[in-house]
Amino acid sequence: MKSFKRLLASAAVAAAAIVLVACGAGKSSSSSKAGTESNPIKVGIMTTDKPIWTDVQKRLAKDNVTIKLVEFTDYNQPNTALENGELQLNAFQHHNFLDNWNKKHDTKIAAIGDTYIGPMRAYSNKIKSLKDLKKGDKVSVPNDPSNEGRALQLLEENGLIKLKKVASPTTRDITENKLDLQITELDATQTAKSLDDVAASVVNNDIAASAGLTPDKAIAVEKIDAKSKPWVNFIAAKTAADKSNKTYEKIVKAYQTDATAKLIEKVYKGSTLPAWNYKF
């Protein structure tokens, strides 16, 4: 019996040692500093922004901060990836989009540094101005809550429709449509592709850039003024507390430079404005 007890005691000690070793190993692994080559900070971006972020990435490397760029081609994935921990930061959306996302998904994703603002524009392969639209013509707009409202407000600015006074209008909020325009809601990525099928399309700035639609081809452009703050794009983190993360601060600082401003001008051919110094 005593021999059996001694055997049990030895087994318990061995088990405890294994647990301690395992815990120590886990702690060592998880404590690896974020932003190093072995533990880079993953930043989700739209593919159209890659030239801008690649330059930021190179400048950060000189400051001993390593980031990994994860590319997306639509707006439906980057916030999910951020919330799930697949990313530490993303940069693709404006304030209105995020407000709608957080409400819908019960998340607390927060802006930690402004990037740029890109006015929405209308394009057409068939007409030279929105004033050329005829009765019953088809017009396509993005279907996500914030960008649809923004597109409809552009149509309203040009006297084509009237809307209810709501924050994010949809086609259901149209109160007047004298030309009986057929307004088609499409995924934002499809608006530029629809130009052969519609009289005009309102297209997000980055989608227009990826489709080769330059500002000089636009038939209408959104006004940028004091009311434009909701449309400012930014770098986002999982919570507002992340704004004080020192490494994230370095990333924001590296982005908000004259070098980045010049690249924004070059990549977007003058269609987009650096927002961090803009007075709204």
Image: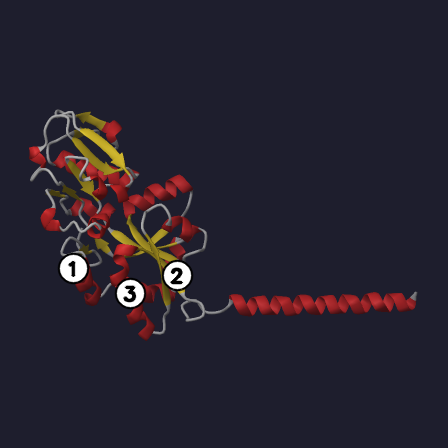
Q: In this view, does 135 lie to the left or right of 110?
A: left
Distance (Cα) linking label 1 and label 2: 25 Å
Tag in front: 3 or 2: 3
Q: Could you tell me which secondary element the residue under label 3 belongs to? A: helix
- Give the residue type that dot 1 points to: Glu
Residue at figure coordinates x 13%, y 56% from the top left: 270
Q: Could you tell me which secondary element the residue under label 2 belongs to? A: strand
- Would you call the spot at circle 2 few (<14 residues within 10 Å), some (14-19), or many (20 or more)? many
Q: Could you tell me which secondary element the residue under label 1 belongs to? A: helix
Q: Is disc 3 in contact with disc 2, using a CB cutoff of under 8 Å?
A: no
The residue indicated by pointer 2 is 42
Number of numbered discs overlaid on the protein picture = 3
Distance (Cα) linking label 3 and label 2: 13 Å
The residue indicated by pointer 1 is 265
Is any atom of residue 165 visible in this view? Answer: no
Which of the marked residues, 3 or 2, is nearer the chain's N terminus? Answer: 2
Would you place residue 7 above or below residue 85 in this image?
below
Q: Residue 154 carries which label?
A: none
Provide residue 228's location: percent of width, then percent of height. 19, 46
Provide residue 138's location: percent of width, then percent of height. 18, 31
- Would you call the spot at circle 1 few (<14 residues within 10 Å), some (14-19), or many (20 or more)? some
Which of the marked residues, 1 or 3, is nearer the chain's N terminus? Answer: 3
Q: Is residue 253 left or right of residue 68?
A: left
The residue indicated by pointer 3 is 54
Is any atom of residue 237 visible in this view? Answer: yes
- Give the residue type that dot 3 points to: Thr
Provide residue 98's location: percent of width, then percent of height. 33, 46
Which of the marked residues, 1 or 2, is nearer the chain's N terminus? Answer: 2
- Give the residue type that dot 2 points to: Lys
Q: Is residue 19 left or right of residue 232?
A: right
